[in-house]
Structures are given as structure tokens and as C-alpha cells.
Amino acid sequence: MELAKKWIKVTVNGEPRELLIKPNITLLDLLRDYLGLTGAKMACISNSCGACTVILDGMAVKSCSVLAMQAEGSEVLTVEGLAEGDKLHPLQQAFINHAAFQCGFCTPGKLMSAKALLDENPQPTEEELKRDMEGNLCRCTGYKKYIEAIMDVAQHPVKYSAKEG
Ligand code: FES
Ligand code: FES
């Protein structure tokens, strides 16, 4: 039986949106299929890999495992909302500086997890960082370089707030 569609109001990357959706779609479906925001990736679809991570009301969530309707009235930030105009977010710049990705498939999720972590704990220890990022898997670059990149941002905020990043 086809479920009746419902209206949802949600703010995505600072923009208020009002959408008529099936009530059983995930937040990842809403972002990718309704809003064309394909930064969050669809991979395991089982809450395991972190490729779909976005920030929901300040918390990193795996959007494949959140119903879109749960985001009603909330603020969602995706990787598309990280940069300010042509100025990359410090984490994006650090990932480039440290060559912290190869294929880049896992990178949006990692960036969003790292942003949520640094927003809450701007000076994490390496152990805290590794523990927090455990849910974001990478198949090709490995784990050393992006940890170095995130630690670089945490330890050198002034360098990364400069115009050139
Ligand atoms: S696609 Fe969501 S955790 Fe893997
Ligand atoms: S950079 Fe390829 S999966 Fe992580």
C-alpha cells in the first residue's frame, strides 16, 4: 500500500525548505533525491560506514539511518554547505594540504564528522579524534593522513582561518 505523502519543513545549509515526501524515506534520500545534494554518499545503507554523515542540529548523524521526517523543523548541514563562497572550510583545506583522500568517496562524511567533533571539542587529543572517527570507514587512503589533517586544524586554528587557508 502506498503511504500518503507528508509535508516536511527543514532548513538545509541555511536555506528553509518545504517538501512533500513519502514518510518512510531516509534523510539521505531527501538530500540526494529531492534536493540534489549528492555530497552525502549512499554506500552500506546500514549505519556502518559513515559515508552518508551529515550534521543534524549540531550532531553528526548517519543520514541513511535517520528518517527524513525526524528532521522536521531541524537544521541540516551537508558538505555542500561547508565552504563560504570560494573559501574552503578549514577542514576541507587541511584535507587538501595533507592529501587526505584518494577517490574521495568517504571524504564528505569524514568532513562532517570532524566538523561536529571540533565544534564540540576544538582541541581533541589524537586518541579522542581516532575514537570519534571510528564510524567513518575509508577503503583507499587509510586513516593516518586525515587524522593528521584534522589535528592540524585543531592545533593551528589561526593558520586555517587566514584567507588562503
Ligand atoms: S551509507 Fe550510511 S552509514 Fe553507510
Ligand atoms: S578516499 Fe577513497 S574511500 Fe576514502
Image (cartoon, rainbow, N blue to C red):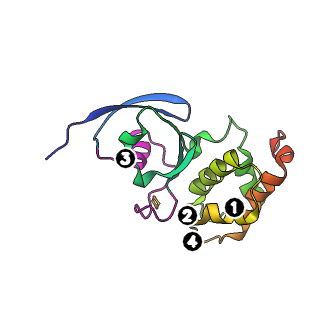
Q: Residue at x 36, y 40 (%)?
A: 69
Looking at marks 1 and 4 on the same chain, the residue that comes earlier in the sequence is marked by: 1
Q: Residue at x 66, y 63 (%)?
A: 101
Q: Is residue 100 visible?
A: no
How far apart are the two marked residues, 3 and 1, measured between alpha carbons? 27 Å
Q: Circles 3 and 1: CB distance less than 8 Å? A: no
Q: For the residue marked with disc 4, what is the amino acid? A: Arg
Looking at marks 2 and 3 on the same chain, the residue that comes earlier in the sequence is marked by: 3
**Relative horizontal placement of residue 40, taking residue 107 as reference (left or right):** left
Q: Which residue is mark 2?
A: 135
Q: Which residue is mark 4?
A: 139
Q: Circles 2 and 4: CB distance less than 8 Å? A: no
Q: For the residue marked with disc 3, what is the amino acid? A: Leu
Secondary-structure class at tag 3: loop
Q: Residue at x 53, y 48 (%)?
A: 54
Residue 32, percent across and down?
43, 46
Q: Circles 3 and 4: CB distance less than 8 Å? A: no
Q: For the residue marked with disc 1, what is the amino acid? A: Leu
Extent of the magenta region: 24-51
Ligand 2 closer than 8 Å to label 1 CB: no
In the rendering, which numbered label is found on residue 67?
Answer: 3
